[in-house]
Image: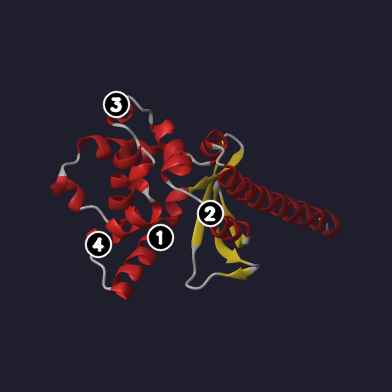
Amino acid sequence: MKPKILILVLICVLLGCTNEKQKVIDTYNKFNLANIERDGERLFELSDSNTHNYYKNFLTKILKLDSVGVSKLNLTEKLNLLSARAVIHDSILKRISPKDLLIKMLTEVSSMDSTQISSIRSLGITNIKIENNIANCELTMDGKVVSPLVNLEFSKENGKWKFDLNSLAEFTEEQLNYICEYHGFTHLDFIEWVFDASNIGEKR
């Protein structure tokens, strides 16, 4: 291959990669905006099939797990499951779809104040690496990489980049357990504290 042709090919590859990385950034920014605006349909559209499958399985847990089953869940899932049962009426849970569950969990069960909105606006992603249809990146706050490192994942589905919410699971679990250890909470103590502080029982 002639040098000039090789250079042109390399330029095209680099430009294509940069364009894909920008699309990943755009997806993340759109997801955060939809989160702030509590736009459930948009949140569902911007999340990937891994996220959708998680909520399908999570709905089964909400409907079927007894107290023993719930006790075996990690702290994040305990909190989410009990919050869903507290906020969403039983008659709705029995006929809700995984899609509608995702929307309700992100827009109704979880609340957001001005401080949280400000925090979301400060978030971004960097150091994006793309391999096939998977993009991995690092979370930033005010332009700086968050410490400890938080890796996020995106999937390209039907030609569009989608955010995998499951990629936040490990970080979320670590943070919740850190709060428990710092304050000397058991998991149950922590969940009761969250319910009291956010008035979850009054949302139903």
What residue do we see at 60% from left, 43% from top?
37
Mark 2, Cα crowd under 10 Å, few <14 / some 14-19 / many 20+, is few
Residue 176 locus on image (x, y percent): 36, 63
Residue furthest left in the image: 68
What label sits on residue 151 in the rendered view?
none
Q: Quadrant of residue 203?
A: top left
Reading the image, the residue beneath label 1 is 172
Reading the image, the residue beneath label 2 is 113
Mark 4, Cα crowd under 10 Å, few <14 / some 14-19 / many 20+, is few
Mark 1 and mark 4 lie on one chain; the one further toward the N terminus is 1
SS under mark 1: helix
Discs 1/2, front: 2
Quadrant housing the C terminus: top left
Reading the image, the residue beneath label 3 is 91
Mark 3 and mark 4 lie on one chain; the one further toward the N terminus is 3
User: In front: 119, or 48?
Assistant: 119
Discs 3/1, front: 3
Amino acid tagged 2:
Asp
Amino acid tagged 3:
Ser
